[in-house]
Amino acid sequence: MSRPAGREPRRLTRWWRRRSLRARLTVIAATAIAVSVFVAFQVASELLGWELQDTAENQLRADSRVLATNAQRAGLAQLQLPPYPGSGRLVRVILPDGSTRTPAGQPALPPVSEHAGRVAQGASADLMESNDSDEDGYLIYTLRAGDGAVQVAHVADDSPINQFGFGMLLIGLLCVVGGTLVGRTVARTGLAPIDRLTAAAVRVAHTRDLDADIPDEGGGEIRRLIQSINDMLAALRDSRRAQRLLAEDAAHELKTPLTSLRLNVELLIRLDRRGTLDSALPAESRTRLLNDLGAQVAELSTLAAELTDLARGDVSDESTELLDLADVVVAAATRARSHVPDIEVALDVTSVWMSGRPAALQRAVLNLIDNAGKWSPADQPVQVRLRAEGASAVLEVDDAGPGIDAADVPRVFDRFYRADSARALPGSGLGLSIVQRVVDAHGGRATVARSARGGALLRVDLPAAVR
């Protein structure tokens, strides 16, 4: 049963991917050296063969000219041909009638070829040809001499090339072995920073110690990788620190309303069990207590919602889109009026387009209006203004309240921070912190100042879209 044609390449690919990087580098280095040696052997063999053949041809031409000169002086039939010495060149004289003369004791050469016969007949001046047989190969040079021709032959000897090839084979094997060792050494040395980086990352994962920076070593890509991981650890440290602070602040802020809520509920339960609820708490006091409980529950709900919003660590998963900030401000003002009917909001907005997250921006504007509504007198509206100023969208929310003390200005946007004068008012101290985070996420800036009416002026600058 035959296997599918594509299965073997896929299996080889899976096997290769399962190898370690060190093993891959070793195999690549050994393969590169082996291929280089093979290519070098092929090129060197060809060059050596060409050089040996060129040398042999030049020697045959020189010997043929000497023999032809002697033949012209003495005549082809009378030319003295010394006995064959047992090795070296082979000689043959082609007479005008096509017969041949050879030295005594010389091995027989291949028959005179048709082209060599044409040289003897004067059709061509010379001819270099090779004859490869099963036993011996000959390189034969034919030169016109007198009325015939002379031939000088050389037995083709491949032994130098074979010896050279054998030597190159041994050298190649040694190079492959050496290349494998060098590849392993290079891989071990080159990957040593990676190994230390891996060990450091594993140590951080096991100990959960984000304060242990990985030593900066190596260069180029290794250094950039280490710096990236250290930056990631720093970001994780900041995130963990922020989460810890958020949890500590949340626990502190939840403690007071939960304690008050628990005491009030326990009081109601205790009086109800004794059957003295009506006598101990007149209707007016009971109504006031229940209103306080409702306000505390609402405050806890708001705090829980704002804590959830802050704990997510980013603005939201909401996508960014091109929007008219005026629509966002109008929608936020409408929500503020529905939440607290007593708040009067005076709008003075112009259309300003920007790229942002509409829900997050609306939440930030709503928090600004709610914050201003806590301080504005009942007969003074919260003024909300939106205009384009250069390349920015400028949003201003001001109230006619007492304003913000100079000592409190630097901490207005801190989480859970509430000025002494604001502790009696409802709120969690997270509203302006959420505003700051939304503004930062949109590349803007939030500031606080005193308004012309004597209250607080909260200003937000956001980058406007280029239209």
Image (cartoon, grey):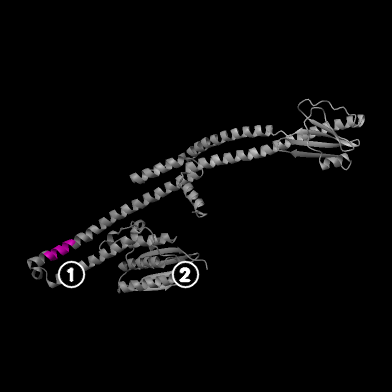
Q: State the SS at label 2.
A: loop
Drawn side of residue 15 relative to residue 119, left or right? left
Q: CA distance from mark 1 to mark 2?
A: 46 Å
The foreground one among 31 and 358 is 31
Q: Amino acid at mark 2?
A: Val
Residue 449: percent from left, percent from top: 39, 62
Residue 294: percent from left, percent from top: 22, 68
Q: Amino acid at mark 1?
A: Arg
The foreground one among 322 and 27 is 27
How many residues crowd around disc 1 within 10 Å: few (fewer than 14), some, or many (20 or more)? few
Q: Which residues are magenta?
A: 262-269
Residue 352: percent from left, percent from top: 47, 69
> Is residue 50 depicted above or below 449 in this figure?
above
- Residue 251 inside the magenta-drawn segment: no
Quadrant of residue 396 within the rendered picture: bottom left
> Is residue 251 depicted above or below 200 in this figure?
below
Label 1 or label 2, whichever comes before in sequence order: 1
Quadrant of residue 51 within the rendered picture: top right
Is residue 425 visible in the rendered image? The answer is: no
Q: Residue at x 50, y 36 (%)?
A: 185
Drawn side of residue 62 relative to residue 221, left or right? right
User: Would you name the residue on which mark 1 appears?
Assistant: 288
Total labels: the figure holds: 2
Residue 289: percent from left, percent from top: 17, 68
User: Would you name the residue on which mark 2 appears?
Assistant: 352
The dot on residue 62 is none
Q: Residue at x 48, y 38 (%)?
A: 188
